[in-house]
Amino acid sequence: MQAMSLSFLTPGKDAVVTEIRAGHGMLHHLAAMGIFPGSRLSVVCADRGSLIVAVSGTRYALSKGMAMKILVGGPALADPGTPDRRPCAFSGCCHAGHGHVPGQKGCGTPGREEMP
C-alpha cells in the first residue's frame, strides 16, 4: 500500500504510521496516544467529522483534520481476533460491526446514546 492520509483508510483496515505532518504540540499529543511513525493502528469507525482508531488495544477519537496529517502505509500484521474488531453493541453505530467505544455516543455521531 502506498502512503496515504489516515482519513482515507477504510474502517477495519490496518496500517503503519509512516509520517506525521504536524507541529510540535500535535506530535506530542499523538505520541501520548501511541501514534508516531512506525506505530500500527486501524480505523474502527469513521464519521463525517471524526474517526475512531485503535492503537495497541486502546481506542482514540481523532478529528478528520488530525487524521489528514497522519500518513499511513503497508498493511500491519495484526491478529484479526483482537478486541478492536468486536461487534458493535450499539445498533446505531456509524459502521455497525466495526466496533463502538464504550462511553462515547455512537462513534461520534451526535445525539446517540450508548446501549446498556
Image (cartoon, helix red, strand yellow):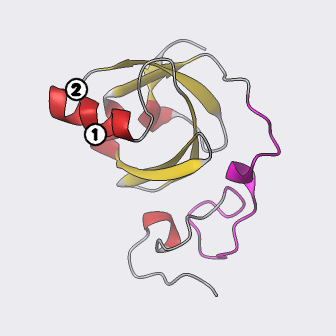
Q: Is residue 8 above or below residue 83?
A: above
- Residue highlighted by disc 1: 29
C-alpha distance separating marks 1 and 2: 11 Å
The residue sitting at the front extreme is 32
- Element assignment for label 2: loop
**Residue 64 falls in image quadrant:** top left
In screen coordinates, is 85 left or right of 11? Answer: right
Local packing at callout 1 (Cα closer than 10 Å; few below 14, some 14-19, many 20+) is few
**Going from the N terminus, do you reach mark 1 or mark 2 first?**
2
Q: Which residues are magenta?
A: 78-98
Q: Nearer the viewer, residue 60 or 93?
A: 60
Left or right side of 9 for 66: left
Split into 4 quadrants, where in the image is the N terminus? top right
Picture disc at residue 18: none
Please name the residue shown 60% across and 75% down the image: 92
Q: Given contact means CB atoms under 8 Å apart, are the residues at marks 1 and 2 in contact?
A: no
Three-letter amino acid code of the residue under disc 1: His
| Closer mark to the observer between disc 1 and disc 2 | 1
Which residue shows up at 67% across the image and 76% down it?
Answer: 91
Q: Position of residue 80 (x, y in %)?
A: 80, 40
**Mark 2 closeness class: few <14, some 14–19, many ≥20 residues within 10 Å:** some
Question: Disc 2 designates what residue?
Answer: 22
Outermost residue, bottom side: 116
| Amino acid on which disc 2 is placed | Ala
- Residue 81 counted in the magenta span: yes
- Image coordinates of residue 88 in percent, x first then y, are 69, 67
89 vs 56, nearest the viewer: 56
Horizontal side, residue 44 vs residue 65: left or right: right
Q: Camera-side residue: 74 or 60?
A: 60
Q: Quadrant of the C terminus?
A: bottom right
| Residue 102 % position (x, y) | 56, 70
